[in-house]
Amino acid sequence: MNQQKQNKDIKWLEQMVERSLLEKLLFSFSKSTGLKAVLVDTEGNTIDSANFEMKYCRFCQMIRSDELGVNKCKRSYARAGKEAAKYGEPYIFRCHAGLIAWAAPILLDNDHVGSVICGQVLMWEPEDYFLEEIEEMVKGLNVDLAAVKWSAAQLEVMSSDKVQAAADLLFVVANQIMRYGMTVLEQRRQIAAQQARLAEEIQARKRVEVAMRTIESRAARLYSIDKEYNLKAEVRNGERKSARQLLDSILIDIISKNYENLHTVKTRIVELMVTISRAAVDAGADLNDILKLNVRFYQELLEKQDADDICLWVKNILEIFMDKVEECKDKKNIQAIQKAAEYIRKNYRHKLTIDEIAQVVYLSPCYLSRIFKQSLGCTLTEYITRVRVENAKIMLKNPKFNISQVAEENGFDDPGYFTKVFKKIEGVTPSNFKQNAL
């Protein structure tokens, strides 16, 4: 990998993930484990902050005091990072100086841009042969050999279980960095796509303006108001897809006319937020919840300094309000289903129609049938039949009622049909059920 690619990886990672977050994650890991964790690029160069408090162990400080030692560390880190990226999991390795360390890969958009390296420790008590091995490994470095051996003997000895646990924890840290980076990357892609759409639409409108020479601003404003009225209706009805499309069109209207005036853009966005929030309340959302959200959103809007960022932010606001409408809609559906079921249980002896039940809960027959099936797993007709059969079973256990009486009392005009339905549900005829029950 050349220097240009290396610099690109570092720049990309630092753009995707805030420096403060990187420092916080690495510092928290080091504090909790007592081990230093560093962020390196794909060439093994350390890119964490100079203000990072956790220092290298004494052994590593001496090894890295020599330029050749630093270069060997880089090669060890680069090789370990590549292996970790290859397998997509923590990679435990032995560094060039003979100590145990581990690497966790950082992948952004399937591209290996760096690794988190942690260590260095021993996994066994140092013996004479190990100290002799260190002497061979540090040959050529301008270091005090006796001091290096002494420092190696002072290193923490960790069991294999602890090393694996620390490696797994390091992988969690690396995953957090990746998730944050991918979130930022996705947001930037959305903004870029939105900018492209806005630019295309703005250019198209400019061509129309040139062809027509002039645009009546009043007519344009009335057109925008008409769109906002339709948006309010779609939000109130819970039509998420249509609401998104209308919002996109309204945002284009706002940005294309006021792109250079951020204050005007924010004013129009506040008006838009009021329209959407009122629609949510009209749909049944809790007024106090909506007011609290509006206060929070207004404070967030004041901090926005970019028109494109505001547009993406408003789209997210719409989704939050639509979720509130959906919650309210689901709650109303449950109440309607409960009321319909209660009405059936009270009136199962009479002839019941879906239209009659729908009128009781103030819903259309088609809509009630759909939500009833989704919620209870059976149709309204099936539920009516089940209620009737359950009550028929109670009556059949009473010797004073014959089959015809039971059928009539439970809404079955034809005893033969009652027998057919009863057997289909219970697996036996009413007569057999009655005999077994007595």
Image: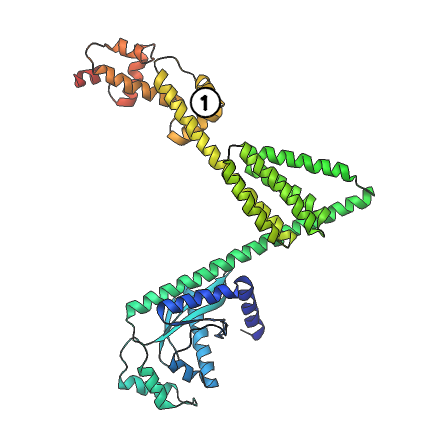
Q: Is residue 13 above or below residue 303?
A: below
Counting from the top left corner in percent of width and height, residue 420 is at 30, 16
Q: Which residue is drawn at 28% across and 18% down?
A: 391
Q: Which residue is drawn at 37% across and 90% down?
A: 145
Counting from the top left corner in percent of width and height, residue 78 is at 46, 74
Tell me how the rendering is colored.
Answer: rainbow
Q: Residue furthest left?
A: 438
The disc labelled 1 sits on which kind of residue? Val
Write down the quadrant of residue 341 in the picture: top left
Q: Which residue is drawn at 44% across and 73% down?
A: 53
Q: Looking at the picture, tell me which residue is in the foreground, 263 or 384.
A: 263
Counting from the top left corner in percent of width and height, residue 147 is at 36, 88
Q: Is residue 3 above or below residue 272?
A: below
- The count of marks equals 1
Write down the quadrant of residue 160 in the picture: bottom left
| Residue 221 can be seen in this image | yes
Q: Looking at the picture, tell me which residue is in the foreground, 233 or 263.
A: 263
Residue 193 lies left or right of residue 162; in this view the side is right
Residue 46 lies left or right of residue 394; in this view the side is right
What crowding class fits label 1: few (fewer than 14 Cα within 10 Å), some (14-19), or many (20 or more)? some
Question: In this figure, which residue is indicated by the disc labeled 1?
Answer: 361
Q: Which residue lies furthest to the right in this view?
A: 213
Counting from the top left corner in percent of width and height, residue 20 is at 50, 65
SS label for mark 1: helix
Q: Looking at the picture, tell me which residue is in the foreground, 407 or 185.
A: 185
Which quarter of the image is occupied by the C terminus? top left
| Residue 251 can be seen in this image | no
Q: In this view, does 390 lie above or below 238?
A: above
